[in-house]
Amino acid sequence: MSKIAWIGLGVMGFPMAGHLKTRGHDLVVFNRTRAKAEAWVARFGGRLAATPAQAADGAEFVFSCVGNDNDLREVTLGQQGAFGALGRGAIFVDHTTASANIARELYQAAKDHGAGALDAPVSGGQSGAENGTLTVMAGGAEPDFQHAKPMIEAFARTINLIGPSGAGQLTKMVNQICIGGLIGGLAEALHFGTRAGLDIGKVIDTIAKGAAQSWQMDNRWQTMIGGKFDFGFAVDWVRKDFALVFEEARRNGAELPVTALVDRFYAEIQDMGGGRWDTSSQIARLERKE
């Protein structure tokens, strides 16, 4: 049994931390909205901390899953941040989708404390967090990764160390680029097939056995044509992630014309009032009545 601090109990962090507790680990949790932390303790047990530093005091592993770079910096390096109590030999594991820059910054800050750090964003959405089937892409040092991997396995099905600090966040950007384009193509295909008068069920049953198959096709085509967009990862969030992608692309010179177009489509969905719809809602802008 390990002593673990968990910072951030949103739609992802809440069940992820729960998996660690149900495996018998000793958890202390912190959330900026105290009511969420109280709800977590009421459900899973463990203890509630008043600050990130209090949560991290004496912890072997400190996990975080918050909103963005600024949130992450606040809960780690802020006045009551976790790094103020980060012990020598502890491992900091961040599951926030954030920039590669802050990942490297926190890696160095942890190293200055004699600790380790991994940037370890996840893919799989709320259902993956609840079912313990997330994919984790990590950046950092191999010894730190091997030390933390048994903890991460509590809520992940696939866990890979991609490279040095920052590589996990860069891989998450690759993931988001892929998903945006895939959903865009699927949305247009379903829209086109419907307008052509085809039996979409038969179409999907046929083409899903060929080169067009994808997870999005298998799991979202029916809900997409049914106008149901309440499956977790919101348009507002993917646009936040795309902003990180574009910032990195400006730095490395990558050209992303398709991603830029998809981002524009999601901006239109936000204008339609769909900021909290999930990413499969790209079809909604095609089906809207002018």
Image (spheres, rainbow, N blue to C red):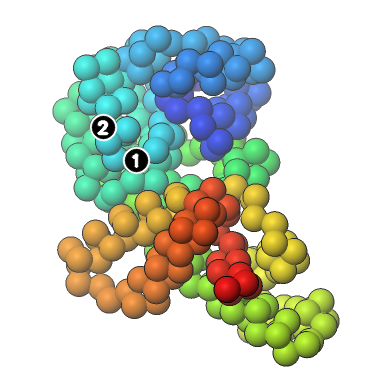
Q: Which mark is residue 73?
A: 2
Under mark 1, the amino acid is: Asn
- When the figure is inspected, residue 221 is found, relative to residue 77, above or below; the finding is below
Residues at circles 1 and 2 in contact by the CB criterion of under 8 Å? no
Location of residue 221 (image quadrant): bottom right
Q: Secondary structure at mark 2?
A: helix
Separation of marks 1 and 2 at Cα, in angstroms: 9 Å
Q: Residue at x 43, y 11 (%)?
A: 49
Residue found at x 60% / y 17%: 39
Give the percent coordinates (x, y) of residue 274.
54, 54
Quarter that holds the N terminus:
top right
The residue carrying pointer 2 sits among few (fewer than 14), some (14 to 19) or many (20 or more) residues within 10 Å by Cα, namely some
Quadrant location of the C terminus in the rendered image: bottom right
Q: Tell me where residue 263 appears, x and y as whole percent.
A: 40, 66
Q: Is residue 40 above or below residue 260?
A: above
Sequence order check, earlier mark of 1 and 2 = 1
User: Residue flagged by tag 2: what amino acid is it?
Assistant: Arg
Q: Which mark is residue 163?
A: none
Residue 61 makes an appearance in the image: no
Depth check: give the residue in front, 216 or 210.
Answer: 216
Question: Which residue is located at x 54 percent, y 48 percent?
Answer: 276
Tell me what residue is drawn at x 61 percent, y 70 percent. Answer: 288
- Front one among 146 and 191: 191
213 to 56, vertically: above or below: below
Q: Which residue is mark 1?
A: 68
Q: Secondary structure at mark 1?
A: loop
User: Residue 47, how many percent across, how many down?
Assistant: 52, 10
Residue 66 left/right relative to 13: left
